[in-house]
Image: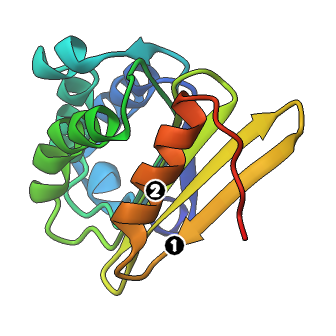
Amino acid sequence: MIFYKANEFQFPRSRDCLTYVAAITPSRRNAIRSITLSLGAHYNRSDAKKGKPGDRLRAIAKLCPNLRVLRYDRFFYRSDSLTDWLTMLAETMEPVVASLPLLKEVHIRGSNDGYTWLTCNMTLEKIWLDLFKSTPQGSVSIRDRGELLERRLFSLWDKIVGNEAVSMA
């Protein structure tokens, strides 16, 4: 069982992960501690309300109840606001996280256009968000873990969406 406990399992899609964990024995599923999904599908709020992509994630969580680390890379979303993205993220992840009592880390990285990336890292000790925007004038990046997090991220998002000049001074 050490193979399952010590390794991080990586899958290109949640379907591949679900197929794999459903095919192995229950004792092996129970030993899995870390899963990374690298998805390329695009989702919007109506998809999240219909259970996409959360249905497969909830099934994976049910089959791997001892999961400690979940990474979800390339969570592409269609959203005009940071609020919509965070709401969709919460609607997707809350039931998954709630069903995994031993979960200690969740890492989610997503984009709405391939140029603006938001990374959300949550552990038992802290939560932080990174917002990165690639522009012709150069890249803009913000990382915040403090109490100004929400205000600063919303301000930067508004500047990016509004195509205003962004100063990180």
Check disc 1 and give the amino acid type: Asp
Which is more toward the observer, 30 or 102? 102
**Residue 168 appears in view:** yes
**Kind of residue sitting beneath label 2:** Leu
Residue 144: image tag: 1
Quadrant containing the N terminus in the rendered view: bottom left
Within 10 Å of disc 1 (Cα), the crowding (few <14, some 14-19, many 20+) is some
Give residue 69's position: percent from left, percent from top.
Answer: 41, 63
Residue 131 sits above or below residue 133 on the image: below
Residue 17: % across, % down? 42, 31
Q: Is mark 1 on a helix, strand or loop?
A: strand
Residue in view at x 66 percent, y 48 percent:
132
Residue of label 2: 153
Q: Contact (CB < 8 A) between labels 1 and 2?
A: yes
Binning the other alpha carbons within 10 Å of mark 2 as few (below 14), some (14 to 19) or many (20 upward) gives: some
- Percent of width and height locating residue 142: 62, 62
Q: Distance between the residues labelled 1 and 2?
A: 8 Å
Q: Please name the residue shown 27% across and 32% down the image.
A: 84
For residue 150, side relative to residue 30 (left or right): right
Picture layout, residue 31 above or below residue 94: below
Q: In which quarter of the image is residue 124?
A: bottom left
Which element is circle 2 on?
helix
Q: Which residue is drawn at 38% across and 19% down?
A: 15
Identify which residue is drawn at 34% across, 87% down: 125
Query: In the orientation shown, which residue stands out farthest toward the bottom?
Result: 125
Colour scheme:
rainbow
Q: Residue furthest front?
A: 164
Q: Nearer the viewer, residue 69 or 93?
A: 93
